[in-house]
Image (cartoon, grey):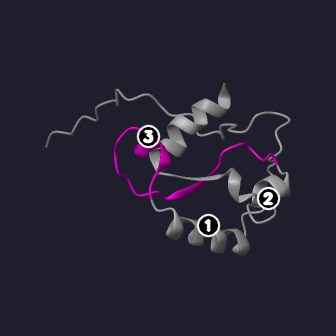
């Protein structure tokens, strides 16, 4: 009986080490939970209420499209400043794409 030959994979092996995603010296630290940074139950209630009142992505609207918002974004990064964090004039509704792609690019500039 012939033995089957095993083929070697042509796919690269992924590095499984943790990739640092936060800038050094940033306000977020790995020893704080989301709740400790202000994103606890009170934020979840406020976020849900905001999205009920402002259900469309403001960036999509500016482009002439109608898209449901899923994220309440802080227009100016609060960097832990709780007064700025809770200021409603600093909030905007965004879809996931605009928050994850365009807003992140804008903040990195």
Main secondary structure along the magenta-highlighted residues: loop
The numbered mark at residue 47 is 1
User: Which percent across, then down, holds residue 93?
Assistant: 54, 54
Of the two numbered discs 2 and 1 on the same chain, state the one appearing first in sequence: 2
Seen in the image, is 2 located left or right of residue 59? left
The residue sitting at 76% across, 66% down in the picture is: 35
Q: Is residue 31 visible?
A: no
Determine whether 47 is above or below 61 in the image. below
User: Distance of mark 3 from mark 2, alpha carbons?
Assistant: 31 Å
Q: Secondary structure at mark 1?
A: helix
Q: Residue at x 51, y 37 (%)?
A: 101
Determine the image quadrant of residue 83.
bottom right
Reading the image, the residue beneath label 3 is: 62
> Sequence-wise, which precedes: disc 3 or disc 2?
2
**Residue closer to the observer: 68 or 5:** 68
- Eye-nearest disc, 1 or 3: 3
* Separation of marks 1 and 3 at Cα, in angstroms: 22 Å
**Picture residue at 81% right of the left edge, 33% below the top:** 24
The numbered mark, 1 or 3, whose residue comes first in the sequence reads: 1
Q: Range of the magenta residues?
A: 56-79
Quadrant that contains the C terminus: top right
Using residue 65 as the reference point, say whether residue 85 is left or right of it: right
Instruction: Indicate left or right for 89 with 84 as reference.
Output: left
List the single residue furthest toward the left. 1
On whether residue 67 falls in the magenta region, the answer is yes
Closest to the camera, between mark 3 and mark 2, is 3
Say which residue label 2 marks.
37
């Amino acid at each position: 009986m012939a033995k089957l030959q095993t083929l070697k994979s042509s796919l690269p092996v992924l590095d499984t080490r943790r990739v640092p995603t936060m800038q050094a010296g940033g306000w977020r630290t790995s020893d704080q939970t989301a709740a400790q940074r202000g994103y606890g139950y009170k934020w979840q209630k406020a976020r849900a209420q905001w999205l009920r009142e402002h259900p469309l992505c403001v960036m999509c609207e500016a482009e002439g499209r109608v898209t449901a918002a899923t994220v309440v974004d802080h227009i100016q990064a609060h960097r832990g400043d709780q007064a700025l964090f809770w200021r409603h004039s600093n909030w905007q509704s965004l879809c996931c794409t605009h928050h994850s792609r365009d807003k992140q690019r804008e903040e990195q500039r």
